[in-house]
Image (cartoon, rainbow, N blue to C red):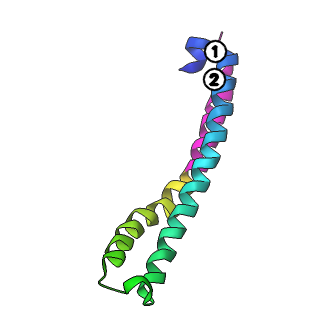
Amino acid sequence: LVGFVLGKEALGGFLAGATLVGVFLALMMANAGGAWDNAKKFIEEGNLGGKGSDAHRAAVVGDTVGDPFKDTSGPSMNILIKLMSVVSLVCAPLFR
């Protein structure tokens, strides 16, 4: 859509920005998911009140959010970045 409306130069800028932001977002998701998982394990070892404490309940919620970040959302950003680039290259002759 960006290429059709604004042209090739705007599409190039869009792809550069999306690639840069996508890489950092994927890194953030993978690291945050791992950190929340490790925080729950740390609390379950008896630190910060152990199992059943408020910290443990919060860590379980964090781990519930963190697992999809770590296992699915972070890695899928790589696929999205590649897909945007390939579709743009295939459609490039159609842009003004």
**Quadrant of residue 61 within the rendered picture:** bottom left
Q: How crowded is mark 2: few (under 14 residues within 10 Å), some or many (20 or more)?
A: few
Q: In this view, does 71 lie to the left or right of 88?
A: left
Q: In this view, does 44 lie to the left or right of 86?
A: left
Instruction: Count up the numbered dots.
Output: 2
16, above or below 75, in the image? above
Residue 19: x and y in percent read 65, 39
Q: Is mark 2 on a helix, strand or loop?
A: helix
Q: Which residue is drawn at 67% across and 40% down?
A: 20
Q: What element carries label 1?
A: helix
Residue 27: x and y in percent read 61, 55
Question: Do the numbered discs 2 and 1 sit on residues whose CB atoms are within 8 Å?
Answer: yes
Main SS, magenta region, reads helix
**Quadrant of residue 4 within the rendered picture:** top right
30, above or below 37, in the image? above
Q: Residue furthest top?
A: 96
Q: Residue at x 35, y 70 (%)?
A: 58
User: In the rendered image, which residue does mark 1 sit on?
Assistant: 94
Please state which amino acid type lies under the numbered disc 2: Cys
Is residue 93 one of those drawn in magenta? yes
Instruction: Please state, as top left, top right, bottom left or bottom right, where the C terminus lies in the image.
Output: top right
Residue 72: x and y in percent read 49, 59
Highlighted magenta segment, given as a residue range: 77-96
Mark 2 → mark 1, Cα distance in angstroms: 6 Å
Please state which amino acid type lies under the numbered disc 1: Leu
Q: Residue at x 68, y 17 (%)?
A: 8
Q: Which residue lies furthest to the front in this view?
A: 48
User: In the rendered image, which residue does mark 2 sit on?
Assistant: 91
Q: Residues within 10 Å of mark 1 (few under 14, many from 20)?
A: few
